[in-house]
């Protein structure tokens, strides 16, 4: 899937099987503009289907500054999309649930 995105110059992905029905993916994706997307996903099999239960996507500039970070950590209960939210350099905003594909699409559309 990652090889389909022309803006990606390099990526590294590690998979860890936690149980027969749960595992995590983590890695980083280097983009043509020098920015990097670090990601973590925890997936469980429920009713024979994969369910993304925890995630974090941290996009930073070539200088190491936060561009955006999407996650579903259970804080920011004041947001109507709790626990889903996105951090910007100076604020936290509501966000729909996301996955790696939707984040890469958002990055492409912001370039």
Image: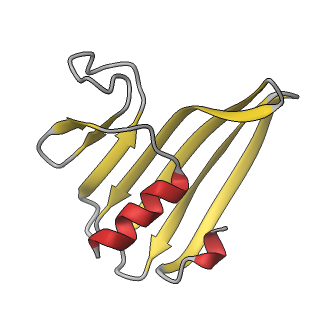
Residue at the spot x=36%, y=66% of the render? 107
Say left or right for 4 vs 50: left
Residue at the spot x=73%, y=36% of the render? 50
Q: Position of residue 5 (x, y in %)?
A: 55, 77
Q: Position of residue 82 (x, y in %)?
A: 34, 22
Q: Is residue 19 above or below residue 32?
A: above
Residue at the spot x=70%, y=52% of the render? 14
Q: Nearer the viewer, residue 78 or 8?
A: 78
Q: Is there any visible trace of residue 62 in the rendered image? A: no
Q: Is there any visible trace of residue 89 in the rendered image? A: yes
Q: Quadrant of the C terminus?
A: bottom left
- From this viewpoint, which residue is outermost toward the top? 77
The quarter of the picture where residue 27 lies is bottom right
Q: Position of residue 52 (x, y in %)?
A: 61, 35
Q: Position of residue 39 (x, y in %)?
A: 51, 50
The quarter of the picture where residue 67 lies is bottom left
């Amino acid at each position: 899937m990652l090889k389909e995105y022309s803006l990606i110059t390099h990526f590294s992905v590690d998979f860890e099987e936690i149980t027969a029905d749960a595992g995590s993916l983590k890695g980083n994706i280097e983009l043509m503009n020098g920015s990097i997307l670090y990601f973590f996903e925890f997936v469980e099999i429920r009713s024979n289907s994969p369910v993304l239960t925890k995630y974090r996507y941290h996009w930073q500039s070539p200088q190491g500054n936060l561009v955006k970070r999407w996650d579903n950590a259970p804080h920011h209960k004041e947001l109507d999309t709790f626990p889903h939210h996105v951090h910007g350099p100076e604020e936290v905003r509501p966000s729909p649930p996301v996955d790696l594909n939707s984040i890469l699409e958002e990055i492409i559309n912001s370039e």
